[in-house]
Image: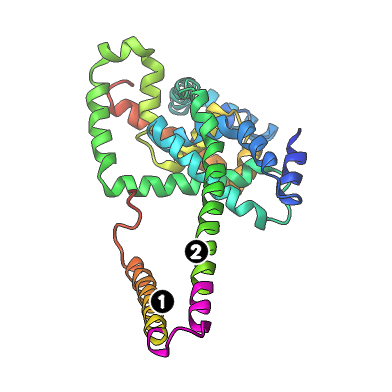
Amino acid sequence: MDESTALHLCLAEKDPRGFEFLVEKYGREAHYHAQGFLRNTADAADACQEAFAKAYAALPRMKRLDRFYPWFYTILKNTCFNMLKRQKRTLQYAEDTAALHRAVSKPDQIAQQNEEKMVVKETLSLLKADHREILVLRHFNGFSYDEMAEFLAIPKGTVMSRLHAARKAFRAEYERSGRG
Amino acid sequence: MNCTTCQQRLSAFLDGELNADEARDVNEHLIRCETCRAEHDRLAETLAKLDLISFEEPEDRVLKNLWKSPYTRLQRNAGLAMVIGGYATLLLYGLFEFLRAGQIPVFPKIAGMAVFTGFALLLLLSIRERMWTRQADRYKEVKR
């Protein structure tokens, strides 16, 4: 089965096997992206489950869909943002940040877990969600500027300026943690 | 090209996303401007670090659950709809037969009808109240 057959099964024949294929194909990628927005794998799994459930409920109302993932990504992103809002309300973010600074100040502990990658990941988690998002798309997924513009539905010029701002923000956080 | 424009374009320059003219302008500026060259080198270092972005590999069990969830939800909702639909039909049928039965006097029939109407009224009132309070519920997003 390929993606267009799966979409046809979902849209025209309301056959759940089409959706099963799409979840299998994009589940891992969705999990990575959710990890980019959220701060741990458990939250990422919850967000993916919720987003796939929303997509499954919304799919029968779609008349036409050429590519599943860009459409699904919007649902996933909104789900992650809602989860972040809830976490903010419970002051989780402040606790995470405090814990992170404590962790970053203990390089001997981090060294055991591939230190540099760990620090990059932790620094990334301190950035604004839209900065994290664009850095992940560029440096993890390797998207070109045109691909990012299409994926995020923003002009290429905005991609350029947002990416630049995100990199500067990353560098500032990296240096603030005493690593730069 | 001034320093501000050059530094704004450095990201795209390093990514190879500028067109030939823009890239040449940035390159020429970098040759003669030490400040922008230093910024270029710092940004290149940052990019090398960002290329280390990685995520934890999700377990197969987690990936399988991504699908199980909506599928189970569909089955559960279908089951729930059948139970509620069947129960409501039986209840209405029982009431209909109860009211229609010739050998039961009118007084218990009126009492039975009152119990049923009262139950339906209370149900409607609690649904309406739940809907009103939900609009002002500060904790509605809290997971239970």
Q: Which residue is the site of mark 2?
A: B87
x 50%, y 61%: residue: B84
Q: Which residues, given as a range, are shown in magenta?
A: B93-108
Q: Residues within 10 Å of mark 1 (few under 14, many from 20)?
A: few
| Nearest to the observer: residue B42 or residue A134 | A134
Residue B103 point in image, percent of width and height: 48, 84
Q: Is residue A18 left or right of residue A83?
A: right
Magenta stretch containing residue B102, yes or no? Answer: yes
Q: Amino acid at mark 1?
A: Ala
Residue B33 point in image, percent of width and height: 48, 27
Asked whether the residues under the numbered discs 2 and 1 touch, taking CB atoms below 8 Å apart as contact, a structural biologist would say no
Residue A142 in which image quadrant: top right
Quadrant where the C terminus of chain A sits is top left
Up-down relation of residue B106 to residue B42 (above or below): below
Q: Is residue B1 visible?
A: no
x 77%, y 40%: residue: A5
Q: Which residue is the site of mark 1?
A: B120
Element marked by disc 2: helix
Element marked by disc 1: helix
| Nearest to the observer: residue B96 or residue A128 | B96
Q: Is residue A113 visible?
A: yes
Up-down relation of residue B109 to residue B84 (above or below): below
| Nearest to the observer: residue B67 or residue A147 | B67
x 53%, y 30%: residue: B63
Q: Is residue A35 left or right of residue A64?
A: left
Q: Report in which chain the residue with disc 2 lies.
A: B
Magenta stretch containing residue B100, yes or no? Answer: yes
Up-down relation of residue A15 to residue A23 (above or below): below
